[in-house]
Amino acid sequence: MSSLKIAIQKSGRLNEKSVELLKNCGLTFENYKSSLISSVSNFPLEILFLRDDDIPEYVQDGIADLGIVGENVISETGVNVHFLQRLGFGKCTLKIAIPNESELVQINDLEGRAIATSYPNILKKYLSDNQINATIRTISGSVEISPGLGLSDAICDIVSTGGTLKSNGLKPFADVMSSEAILIGKNGIEEEEAVKELMQRIQSVLKAKETKYVVLNVKRENLQIIVDLLPGVKSPTVVPLAEEGWVAVHTAIQERDFWEKINKLKAAGAQGIVVMPIEKIIM
Ligand code: ATP
Ligand code: ZN
């Protein structure tokens, strides 16, 4: 079979995490900044390094079989591609923001106003869903300076921490869409064996990221309380310690309820708690 091609961002906010994800999947390749294409030596895959804006169309047209790109870019380009997997990085929100001193109060107040954005299609749909008539001014960069220049009453742009808004005297006004990096494929590619294999590897890497490996010591008389607190991968492994009456418990804990669980375990008599990252979980 000929190699699959996956398109990832050449440089920018998604590049590093995309490369890291593929490497964590056990793929070996050179990450030359200067080249457009890199071959994976231990998997039938070639990596294309592109501008993120070009990725959806390359995948739709089959020039690449797979791509990693922000949902915001997919929505904006309106391409017909297959959504394979959310990847949990590149999280951000497309927001409407207004100057701090603006008199606008609710989203209907945008009626008849001008909004600057690099996402005219997403904004157009949002405005029509909310039955607002406003002028969309499409600009390709530095959208946040446009109200200060008198070009618009509001902007619609990507926000992650809000620092850029603040430093330009703007405040969030409405959320338009939330986004994260996503793996897309050309329609039908999900049936290919190599794609299924790659997806399985990606899912095991993502699953491992959500989980921590925990080892703790506890007196045997308190073991049952600890076990009840720990619905692990299946059930915890319990190993006797050299010291009479003590055991070590090995288990996995979900990252999201980590602190709550750890505090309950301590309260139940757990000692010497060691927490380790997990590389992969194969289900
Ligand atoms: P390219 O040169 O590839 O066109 P770009 O400048 O358009 O890059 P980046 O700024 O690198 O794009 O952002 C890539 C993606 O990262 C965005 O489309 C979005 O999905 C995501 N992202 C996450 N946080 C942010 C943020 N604070 N600002 C912009 N994009 C963000
Ligand atoms: Zn771009």
Image (cartoon, rainbow, N blue to C red):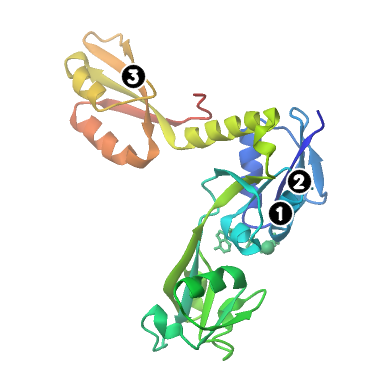
User: Does the residue at mark 1 contact the one at mark 2 (Cβ under 8 Å)?
Assistant: yes
Extreme residue toward the left, this view: 221
Q: Which mark is residue 55?
A: 1
Residue 160 is at least partly visible in this image = no
* Residue of label 2: 64
Question: If you read the primary sequence from the N terminus, does the residue marked by circle 1 or circle 2 appear first?
Answer: 1
Callout 1: helix, strand or loop? helix
Callout 3: helix, strand or loop? loop
Whole-angstrom CA distance, mark 3 to mark 1, is: 44 Å
Residue 117 is at least partly visible in this image = yes
Task: Mark 2: give few (<14), some (14-19) or many (20+) Cα within 10 Å.
Answer: many
Pointer 1 residue Cβ closer than 8 Å to ligand 1:
no
x then y, percent, for residue 46: 78, 39
* Residue of label 3: 236
Residue at left offset 30%, top offset 40%: 259
Callout 2: helix, strand or loop? loop
Q: Relative to 13, is 110 above or below?
A: below
Pointer 3 residue Cβ closer than 8 Å to ligand 1:
no
